[in-house]
Each structure stands twice: as structure tokens, then as C-alpha cells.
Image (tube, rainbow, N blue to C red):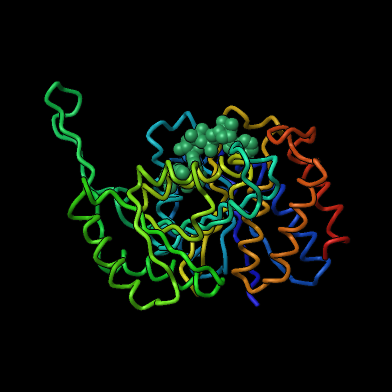
Amino acid sequence: MKNRIAVIPGDGIGQEVAQAGVKVLEAISQKKGLNLSFKWFDLGADRYLKTGETLPQPVFDELSTSFDAIYFGAVGDPRVPDMKHAKDILLGLRMRLDLYINLRPVQLYHEELTPLKNKGVSDIDMVIFRENTEDLYVGMGGNFKMNTVDEIAINEMVSTRKGVERIIRAAFDWAVSHGKTRVCMTDKANAISYAHGLWQRVFKEVSKEYPQITPRHVYADALAMELVRAPEDFDVIVASNLLGDILSDLGAQLVGGLGLAASANIHPNRVSLFEPVHGSAPTLAGKNLANPFAMVLTGALMLDFLGYADESKRLEALVKSCIDDKITTTDLGGKLGTQEMADYMVSLVDRFF
Ligand code: NAD
Ligand code: IPM
Ligand code: MN
């Protein structure tokens, strides 16, 4: 079993939810003898502003060779408006560790949490496979005649045959291994003909290898509408980096908000990174208001990746029971602060494990 975890709390509420998440995982590890070890890394806006360092090479080397997983809070700080540190740390780890699968479950735990009328827990249960190493995120481009009236700003949108194929394949494989029957690919090939034309061709080709799965294509604008109109029509969605980013926040709100949305940045069989979908939420930071459920559910995804499938399911059930009992942070209508919520979850470990 794998058990070496690097913790990068990062900025803002990332700090608070990381404390909470590790507290819960430590309690589980102790109860079940999992022997999880946690090493904390000080990476984020404070360090960048103090020292100019974002992700120093020795730290990257250690992260890539000495750990099984990285448990990541969030990055983003109003004092660093160009997100320089976040580009190096979060996008840097995704690209340099080649974490090509960004898996983002959209699962409704209680019908009262969705803003949609007449939709229940069986209607909203899907997973978004977001490509995580290409697209507009590669940082290719530049500015010409910056800060003049003639300025030109370019970001290149990159799709490779290899990159598109491996994420589409991952989506199909996941559907098969999880007993799902529908994979929907979304793009804007009607406007972005070269890059997304490639997505269309590869999707058609790969889908032929999976006769047990019903493939579907929906343009991304229409998909934003369909996800609100009929979320029950979707099991697995596969999308490019930017479209997947946008759709995953939409998905988060369908199930109760960013306080509940977990995500995994995976390269199968290599060190992978687990972080909630939400960011550093500067307006909530330092106030003990952030919902730690997204971070704890992200911990459940990490446990599954480390080989603890049963513990992962139990942790999810523990969170669900808090929601059922209406013992939550204020964003979900409850009264608890971040750390009190974590302590309450720890108090349930004996019952659920
Ligand atoms: P955000 O996800 O940080 O917050 C948006 C809103 O969602 C918040 O104002 C809050 O109302 C709510 N929210 C988010 N997480 C919550 C939680 N755990 N509990 C309760 N409510 C929660 O998005 P933003 O405000 O657009 O971004 C803030 C900073 O975070 C920016 O710098 C952004 O670039 C960065 N960001 C980082 C990540 C990441 O590290 N993975 C993800 C998204 C945004
Ligand atoms: C996410 C975030 C990041 C992204 C930002 C912080 C660069 O929104 O993890 O969803 O766009 O991938
Ligand atoms: Mn995002």
C-alpha cells in the first residue's frame, strides 16, 4: 500500500481546509493502522512574497520522488494578481508531473442541496474528466506592444493527438470499470475547428473500441444548459482543460456548491495530486468559515488512489451522514466553523471505520 503524503496547504482557506482534512485522515489512519505519513510544505503566496521562491527545484524533486500523493489546499492571493506563484506551483505540478486526468465527481448527497427543482440524488451523479496538461493552459504566447493602443495578446490553444486520446480513453475506461454506460464528449468544434476537430475525430475513433458504452457529443455551450435541464442524462463527461474547468464549477453548484466539490489530478501509477475544486476564497480566509467537506472528500479520492477503496467509501459515507444530520458549516445552512466541523468528523471515525 502507498502511504507517503505531501501536504501543500497553499493560500487562504487552503490552509484551513488542509488542517481539517489531515486531521480527519490522521484519525482514520490511526484507527485502521494505515500508517499514512504527512509532510507539510510551505509553498504559496507568503513564501513567494518573502523570498521570490515559488516551487524550488529541490522541492519539486522531493515531491516527484519521495511521495505517493500530494494533498493540496488551494493557491491564489490578491497580493499576487498575476498568479505567478500559482502558475509555477499548481499548474507547474500538473504539467511537470504529467497529471493528465483531472477527475471531478459531481455527485448529489442530499436533494435539499441542489438548486434544481425535482431532482434527487440519483439524478445528479456524474464524473467530469478534464484534460489537465494542454489547451490554453500551456502558457504559450505573449504580449506585443504591451500597454499601447496597438497591443496584441496571444495565448495558444494546444491539443495533441496523444493528449486528447489518453484523456478520452481514461474517460471510457473509467466508465467501464464503474459500470457506467454513457460518455459525453464536449467541445466547440463548430468555432474552434482545428483543435476541437481533433477532439471530434479521436472521440469517434476511440468510442468504437467501447461498444458497451453509448457515446454522445454535445457542444459546450449547449452542455452548460443540458447539465441544468437534465443532469440525469450524464454519467461521464470528457472535456478539454478550460471547458472542463468551467463545467466543473457549474457541476459543483448543482450539488450544493464549491464547499462540496472534490478533485483528483492523476497520472495512473505515478505520484498524483488531490485538491478540492474550489480556490483560496480570500473573502472567507482566516475566518474559520470554509467548508472542509470538499477537502475531506478529496481525501477520500486520495485514499482510493492509494489503494484504500473501502476506507474511501466509508469516508464518503461519513460526510454524507453529516449532511443528512444537518451538521455542517454555514454555507450549507449549519452552524459549525471549519475546525469544529473537522473535530465532529473525527468524532465519527469510530462509528464509520
Ligand atoms: P473560489 O473557489 O476561491 O471561491 C469562490 C466562492 O466560492 C467563494 O467566495 C465562496 O463563496 C465559495 N467557496 C469556495 N470554497 C468554499 C468552501 N470551502 N467553503 C465555503 N464556500 C466556498 O474562487 P475565486 O474567488 O474565483 O478564486 C479565489 C482565488 O483562488 C483566485 O486567486 C483563484 O485564481 C484561485 N483558485 C485556485 C484554485 C486552486 O488552487 N485549485 C481553484 C480555483 C480558484
Ligand atoms: C482549478 C482552478 C485553476 C484552473 C486555476 C487556479 C489556475 O480554477 O483548479 O479549477 O484553472 O485549473
Ligand atoms: Mn477552476
Q: Would residue 154 appear left or right of 236 to someone viewing this image?
A: left
Task: Tell me, yes or no, if residue 63 can be seen here.
Answer: yes
Q: Would residue 65 appear left or right of 116 to someone viewing this image?
A: left
The quadrant of the picture occupied by the N terminus is bottom right
- Image coords of residue 192 (percent x, y): 21, 48
- Image coords of residue 97 (percent x, y): 42, 64
Compared to residue 289, the image places residue 267 above or below, namely: below
Residue at 48% over, 47% down: 248
- To which quarter of the image does residue 259 belong? top right
- Image coords of residue 99 (percent x, y): 43, 63
296 and 57: which is toward the camera:
296
- To which quarter of the image does residue 340 belong? top right
Compared to residue 98, the image places residue 249 above or below, namely: above
Instruction: Tell which residue pokes out farthest to the top in this image.
Output: 149
Instruction: Give the tally of numbered discs.
Output: 0
Compared to residue 26, the image places residue 136 above or below, namely: above
Residue at 68% over, 72% down: 308
Q: Would residue 20 appear left or right of 67 to someone viewing this image?
A: right
Ligand 2 - quadrant of the structure image? top left
Task: Tell me, yes or no, if residue 13 can be seen here.
Answer: no
Residue at 76% over, 45% down: 323
93 and 187: which is toward the camera:
187
Q: Would residue 97 appear left or right of 153 to someone viewing this image?
A: right
The quadrant of the picture occupied by the C terminus is bottom right
216 and 274: which is toward the camera:
216
Instruction: Tell which residue pokes out farthest to the front in this image.
Output: 118
Residue at 80% over, 41% down: 326
- Image coords of residue 8 (percent x, y): 57, 51
